[in-house]
Image (cartoon, grey):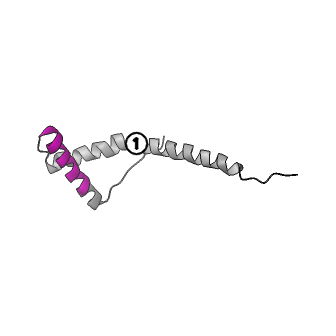
Amino acid sequence: MLKLEIELNKETRIILIENLKRYYWNERNEELGNLAADLLLDFIVNDIGPHIYNKAVEDSYAYMNERTEDLLGLQKRLR
């Protein structure tokens, strides 16, 4: 099986780390440090992310197949 690696640029990582820290504070009333948030983000991206990515690919595949079937409906009738 192909190993999926999701890489985030530095700016995106900073935003997501801040989002995780804010989430922990708002939902759990706990302060999450930068290192802990960074490690949690790595876990989410590497362990959970591929499942979400694969689901998106499957949904896209199904959508494109439906559109391909619709395309056949555009054929001209032959006499």
Query: In the image as oriented, which residue stretches furthest toward the right?
Result: 79
Residue 34 located left or right of residue 58? left
User: Residue 4 at x, y = what percent?
Assistant: 42, 46
- At 11% from the left and 41% from the top, the residue drawn is 30
User: Residue 21 at x, y = what percent?
Assistant: 17, 48
Task: Give the dominant element type of the magenta stretch: helix, strand or loop.
Answer: helix
Write down the region rendered in magenta: 15-29
Query: In the image as oriented, which residue stretches furthest toward the bottom?
Result: 11
Q: Give the residue type that dot 1 points to.
A: Ile
User: Residue 6 at x, y = what percent?
Assistant: 37, 51
Residue to which mark 1 is pinned: 52
Looking at this view, is 66 or 9 the one in front? Answer: 66
- At 36% from the left and 44% from the top, the residue drawn is 49
User: Residue 24 at x, y = what percent?
Assistant: 17, 43
- At 55% from the left and 46% from the top, the residue drawn is 63
Residue 53 located left or right of residue 28? right
Looking at this view, is 76 or 30 the one in front? Answer: 76
Secondary structure of the residue carrying tag 1 is helix
Is residue 42 located in the magenta-colored stretch of the structure? no
Q: Residues within 10 Å of mark 1 (few under 14, many from 20)?
A: few
Could you tell me if residue 3 is visible in this image?
Answer: no
Q: How many numbered discs sit on the rendered protein?
A: 1
Could you tell me if residue 4 is visible in this image?
Answer: yes
Residue 61, by quadrant, is top right
Looking at this view, is 59 or 34 the one in front? Answer: 59
Residue 77 located left or right of residue 53? right
